[in-house]
Image: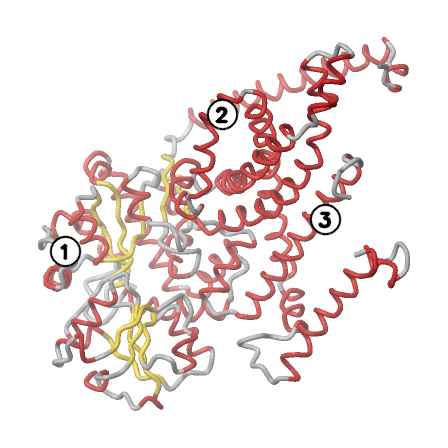
């Protein structure tokens, strides 16, 4: 990585490289259907997809706003719940042994299987989608919080204790801060999973959202629309990931993987 | 450790905050009081509307225009029904949602799913049927050389394994083609394999897939209709639980009549009906929805049909026997228990025709 950075000039690598890659991908998308004479039914050129997006821009925007709202609500709830559970499991080991297996079981069941039940419980409300986003988010956050807190250097704990720090001080000043980089990684994972949860949640009956548009396009063979929604999901996902990464860099500047 | 901000905190600040909170509390209390008065006003006036929900079998589209039109035109409000229309989706089973009580009414698969529900002992009763003729057909391209049902022999046929396969097998059996005489493959969400020629015959609903094929330029299709071979699968059944049908017959009656009114208006004013549906879901393709609306007319009121949303027992009994013979049903259920036409009979005839 450092070699490439040196090649592209200092400071430019992290910004210019992705932009160049995106432009290359866009060019390939635009040109390959034309050069290889691929039917738009199989792979429409990017310009067709963007034109469709412009044509229905208000609808797309409404869909994005709805899906992002669901994602953020589900992600926030999942992150808070995950961090709380991870901390609890790390501090109270018997609880971990008792409850954690249930968490694992919950994650091995495909979320689609829960769909009907979520609808029975919460109806066709935005809450039903939030719950599914929550369901996909909390697990990685729990696991990473748990691992991060347990990975705390025992020598540092001993040092703080020797200065007379109580368990609360050790937790707030040492264990949690040293776990934050690990938790932050889970949050980046969680926001992507939360988006998937919101989209899948919309498959259980709604009229607004990227997930609804995805299904409609799928079942009416509207291929250009399908690519448009795929593109939107990608852009939204990348945006959310970037936002979380940005906040992380600001708040957890001591992260270990930087 | 002291935080720098704490230096700037003063008692005056705190007082202003308290005063602000007080003012907010007063405004909130007044608003809440007004709300209570307003609420009392509405409940004290006209009879309180009953909150009711309808679960559709699929996403919002003109296939369900009658309900959306009746809602938009206030036909449900007029009979004291506050209706929420819940769209379905690929992973939702409207029967289960109604049986569980999550939804009051459901527009479910069709006669075959209602018979299966009765066979499984689900406490559901159908009180109306939308499509009085089989809404799906089997299509072949002209280039495949298939011109009659006998030509299916040795061909690759794709269909949905959610009931349509029994219709297909029964049709083919009527011309002496057994299950071993052709290749049957499950059909997925996309018509691609048919368009590409990977399968010779595909299944299409007249209101969705068939329209998609036509829109893609496949206008020269040979269409095989089950009804031409004496098999009819009425579809899109209106169901509720037996408990509601017995306990709140007036609610069911009102719902059915408002729905009939909605369908009558929708079929008489197809353009406006499409507009109403498009308003609910603007992301829909208008041309596709308009084409769908046009097909509904012939599915819901085919020549010789008793009227909109009619329950035709002879067709259903014949289908029940067919499904029993195919091993889908353990017995021929009591179709008069699974389909109850007393509400439909009590509805004025003027609502059932165009």
Q: Secondary structure at mark 3?
A: helix
Between residue B175 and residue A98, name the one nearer to us: A98
Quadrant housing the C terminus of chain B = bottom left
Q: Chain of mark 2?
A: B
Identity of the residue drawn at 44% across and 49% down: A205
Tag 1–tag 3 contact (CB < 8 Å):
no
Q: Which residue in the structure is indicated by mark 3?
A: A242
Distance of label 1 from label 3 (alpha carbons): 54 Å
Q: Secondary structure at mark 1?
A: loop
Tag 3–tag 2 contact (CB < 8 Å):
no
Q: Secondary structure at mark 2?
A: helix
Q: Which residue in the structure is indicated by mark 1?
A: B329
On residue B39, which mark appears?
A: 2
On residue A100, which mark appears?
A: none
Residue A6, relative to residue B7: is it above or below? below
Q: Chain of mark 3?
A: A
Q: Is residue B290 left or right of residue A20?
A: left
> Mark 2 or 1 closer to N-term?
2
Q: Residues within 10 Å of mark 2 (few under 14, many from 20)?
A: few
Between residue B31 and residue A86, name the one nearer to us: A86
- Disc number lying in front (1 or 3): 3
Distance of label 3 from label 2 (alpha carbons): 46 Å
Label 2 and label 1 in one chain: yes
Give coordinates of residue B101: x percent, y percent: 31, 37
Residue B88, relative to residue A164: is it above or below? below
Q: Is residue A199 left or right of residue A247?
A: left
Distance of label 2 from label 1 (alpha carbons): 51 Å
Residue A162, relative to residue B274: is it above or below? above
Between residue B275 and residue B56, name the one nearer to us: B56
């Amino acid at each position: 990585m450092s070699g490439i950075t040196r090649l592209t000039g200092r400071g430019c690598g992290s910004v210019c490289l992705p932009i160049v890659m995106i432009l290359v991908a866009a060019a390939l998308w635009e040109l390959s259907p034309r050069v290889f004479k691929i039917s738009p039914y199989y792979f429409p050129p990017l310009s067709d997809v963007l034109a469709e997006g412009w044509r229905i821009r208000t609808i797309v925007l409404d869909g994005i706003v709805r899906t992002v709202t669901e994602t953020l609500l589900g992600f926030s709830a999942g992150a808070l719940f995950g961090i709380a559970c991870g901390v609890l499991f790390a501090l109270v080991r018997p609880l971990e042994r008792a409850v954690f297996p249930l968490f694992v079981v919950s994650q091995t069941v495909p979320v689609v299987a829960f769909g009907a039940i979520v609808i029975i419980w919460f109806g066709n409300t935005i809450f039903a989608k939030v719950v599914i986003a929550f369901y996909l988010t909390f697990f990685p956050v729990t696991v990473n919080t748990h691992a991060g807190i347990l990975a705390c250097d025992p020598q540092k704990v001993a040092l703080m204790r020797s200065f007379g720090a109580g368990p609360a001080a050790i937790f707030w000043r040492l264990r949690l801060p040293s776990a934050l980089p690990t938790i932050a990684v889970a949050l980046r994972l969680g926001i992507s999973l939360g988006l998937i949860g919101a989209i899948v949640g919309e498959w259980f009956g709604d009229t607004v959202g990227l997930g609804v548009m995805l299904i409609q396009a799928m079942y009416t063979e509207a291929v250009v629309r399908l690519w448009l929604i795929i593109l939107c999901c990608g852009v939204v996902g990348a945006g959310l990931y970037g936002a979380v990464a940005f906040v992380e860099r600001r708040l957890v500047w001591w992260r270990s993987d930087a | 450790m002291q935080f720098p901000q704490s230096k700037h905190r003063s008692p005056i600040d705190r007082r202003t905050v308290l005063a602000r909170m007080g003012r907010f509390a007063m405004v909130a209390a007044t608003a809440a009081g007004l709300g209570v008065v307003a609420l009392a006003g509405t409940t004290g006036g006209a009879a309180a509307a009953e909150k009711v929900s309808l679960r559709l079998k699929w996403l919002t589209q003109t296939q369900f225009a009658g309900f959306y039109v009746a809602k938009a035109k206030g036909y449900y409000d007029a009979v004291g029904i506050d209706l929420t229309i819940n769209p379905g989706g690929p992973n939702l089973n409207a029967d289960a949602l109604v049986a569980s009580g999550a939804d009051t009414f459901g527009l479910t698969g069709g006669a075959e799913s209602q018979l299966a529900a009765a066979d499984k002992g689900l406490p559901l009763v159908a009180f109306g049927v939308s499509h009085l003729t089989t809404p799906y057909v089997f299509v072949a391209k002209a280039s495949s050389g298939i011109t009659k049902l006998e030509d299916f022999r040795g061909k690759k046929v794709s269909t949905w394994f959610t009931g349509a396969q029994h219709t297909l097998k029964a049709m083919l059996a009527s011309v002496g083609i057994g299950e071993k005489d052709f290749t049957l493959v499950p059909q997925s969400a996309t018509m691609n394999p048919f368009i590409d020629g990977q399968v010779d015959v595909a299944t299409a609903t007249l209101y969705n897939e068939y329209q998609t094929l036509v829109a893609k330029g496949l206008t020269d299709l040979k269409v095989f209709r089950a009804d031409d071979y004496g098999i009819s699968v009425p579809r899109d059944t209106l169901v509720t639980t037996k408990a509601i049908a017995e306990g709140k017959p007036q609610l069911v009656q009102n719902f059915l009549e408002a729905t009939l009114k909605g369908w009558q208006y929708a079929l008489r004013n197809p353009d406006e009906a499409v507009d109403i549906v498009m308003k609910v879901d603007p992301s829909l393709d208008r041309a596709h929805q308009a084409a769908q609306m046009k097909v509904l007319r012939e599915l819901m009121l085919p020549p010789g049909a008793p009227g909109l949303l009619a329950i035709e027992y002879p067709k259903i009994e014949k289908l029940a026997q067919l499904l029993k013979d195919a091993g889908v049903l353990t017995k021929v259920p009591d179709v008069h228990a699974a389909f109850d036409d007393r509400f439909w009979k009590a509805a004025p005839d003027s609502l059932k025709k165009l």
